[in-house]
Image (cartoon, rainbow, N blue to C red):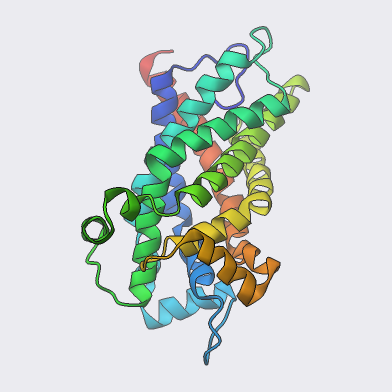
Amino acid sequence: MVGGGPNASTSPLMSLCAGGIAGGVEAACTYPFEFAKTRVQLYGHDKGPGATRNPFAIVFRVARDEGFRAMYKGCSTMIVGSVGKDAVRFLAFDSIRAAFEDPSTGTLGPSGSILSGMVAGIVASTTVVTPSERVKTALIDDAKTTRRFRGAAHCIATLVREQGFVRGLWKGYIPTSMKQVGATGFRLGSYSSIKDWERKRGIDVDSAAVSFANGAVAGTFTTLATQPFDTVKTMAQQAKQVRTADVFRQILAQDGVRGLWRGTVMRLGRTVLSGGILFTANEQALKMLKMLTGQ
């Protein structure tokens, strides 16, 4: 259980299952925000008639021109990826934290919590996040451009055939990993630290309302700190093959340093909401699993 506690022993299998459930719920609830954010990052530099960087305008335009279902293009891939990503992240974080926390109080300092989250981020990026993000981004890009992918499976097969297994699916690994190190470190680390601080002051950290509020705060910190990595990662994972270094130079040439924060508004809206949903779902899933297993 994120945040630990003197009586909060959680088995690795339970961390894995609860994290997967939480990731799937969060992805399904917040995907339109992710879709709009990705479109802004991919095409926010366009200067043609009707071009806009307003993510809300993009949502309305896509719903009007392409249909509401278009905003869920690539959603199944993200849900599958989120289930795996958050299962691995929570498992790795809980395991690392448990090894270093104070056994008498079940707490760990802010630096230790953030470091545990960073290591969990590397594990998640390597095993799940990079390939799932690559396919999701390629599908969103393709839906606006060539429309040659018939679905996630066809997209994967095409990318592997044209670019090779590793290059095709792990494109953007470095910026994705850097984003995951920062995002997981800040999100899980700050959430865990907030819970430790509240627990010492007698606050009921297991209530759904407190979990949601803590997750929303952690999501805000995470977005502001890691947005540049997310922008570069998205541009590097579009359907056509591009180099990460070229993407970075392109963003700076088009918009300057502020271009690295392209899509922040929509991502902030998503991560504040998703942070609340993710941690609330994880806490409630743990309670349900413990009840079902009699723990």
Q: Is residue 278 left or right of residue 132?
A: right
Q: Quadrant of the C terminus?
A: top left
Compared with 144, 49 (above or below) is below
Residue sticking out furthest to the bottom: 49
Q: Is residue 247 left or right of residue 242?
A: right
Q: Foreground residue, 37 or 8?
A: 37
Place of residue 171 in the rendered image (x, y in percent of width and height, measured from the top left): 40, 54
User: Which of the 4 quarters of the picture holds residue 152?
Assistant: bottom left
Place of residue 249 in the rendered image (x, y in percent of width and height, measured from the top left): 58, 67
The residue sitting at 61% across, 37% down in the picture is 185
> Can I make out residue 174 in this image?
yes
Q: Foreground residue, 23 or 135?
A: 135
Q: Is residue 103 left or right of residue 278?
A: right
Place of residue 17 in the rendered image (x, y in percent of width and height, measured from the top left): 38, 29
User: Which of the 4 quarters of the picture holds residue 5?
Assistant: top right
The residue sitting at 56% across, 45% down in the picture is 178
Compared with 289, 179 (above or below) is below
The residue sitting at 34% across, 53% down in the picture is 167
The residue sitting at 53% across, 61% down in the picture is 245
Q: Foreground residue, 203 or 268?
A: 268
Place of residue 124 in the rendered image (x, y in percent of width and height, measured from the top left): 45, 37
> Can I make out residue 198 in this image?
no
Residue sticking out furthest to the right: 201
Q: Is residue 166 left or right of residue 6?
A: left
Q: How many numbered discs?
A: 0
